[in-house]
Image (cartoon, rainbow, N blue to C red):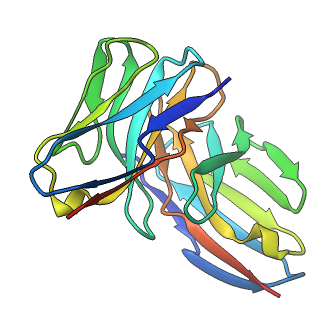
Amino acid sequence: ELKVEQNPLFLSMQEGKNYTIYCNYSTTSDRLYWYRQDPGKSLESLFVLLSNGAVKQEGRLMASLDTKARLSTLHITAAVHDLSATYFCAVDAGNQFYFGTGTSLTVIP
Amino acid sequence: NAGVTQTPKFRILKIGQSMTLQCTQDMNHNYMYWYRQDPGMGLKLIYYSVGAGITDKGEVPNGYNVSRSTTEDFPLRLELAAPSQTSVYFCASRGRGPDGYTFGSGTRLTVV
């Protein structure tokens, strides 16, 4: 079974600071996805990474994929309060995705 | 497009009761999924389907049943509800291309 590990599980950061969330997975896959979940809400798609070296950016968030290292990163630049949410990575294993445990991000003013 | 529609949004069940959670998608997606999410936790796959007439177990199938008679619908049946089934249930779908899952808005179920 494919294992997907995210770290950290909890992240509290000050507004204006930078930080990176890591997503490691245990088997070969060329497709990785990032989702955002606000409290009490469903999951919303953030990024779709489809090949080694893929980099996507949206606002203060940038995601990258290194399939050889089996690692994806979600980098937060100059955090703002609106980014407070739980972030999940998910690895495409064919018939299903395997989700990471999630990173709960709180941005403190 | 409505995307993935789940009903009901909230439900309280008594122990031993049964119910069906409905999930419908209008994107002609082949793949459909049911996940549960316990408070503060990640997603656990209950059942999935790769097309009409085909279903398969996920990580936590016990106490649940599914059917996929059409491409659009993927209902989840709870038989003999137990407090351990108190959770938020998400339905999701995806097509054969590279796009990821589209999630429904969720059903918050409490078993008392």
In the rendered image, the vertical position of residue A84 relative to residue A96, given as above or below: below
Q: Is residue B111 left or right of residue A18?
A: left
In the rendered image, the vertical position of residue A69 relative to residue A109, given as above or below: above
Residue B79 visible in image: yes
Q: Is residue B14 left or right of residue B41?
A: left
| Residue A52 % position (x, y) | 72, 40
Which residue is more in the foreground, A77 or B1? B1
| Residue B43 % position (x, y) | 43, 54
Which residue is more in the foreground, A21 or B27? B27
| Residue B22, quarter of picture | top left
The quadrant in which the C terminus of chain A is found is: bottom right
What number of labels is visible? 0
| Residue A40 % position (x, y) | 55, 62
| Residue B24 % position (x, y) | 47, 25
Q: Residue at x 48, y 47 (%)?
A: B106
Which residue is more in the foreground, A45 or A97? A45
Which residue is more in the foreground, A32 or B17? B17
Residue A68 visible in image: no
Q: Is residue A20 left or right of residue A61?
A: left
Q: Residue at x 46, y 46 (%)?
A: A98
Q: Residue at x 73, y 60 (%)?
A: A74
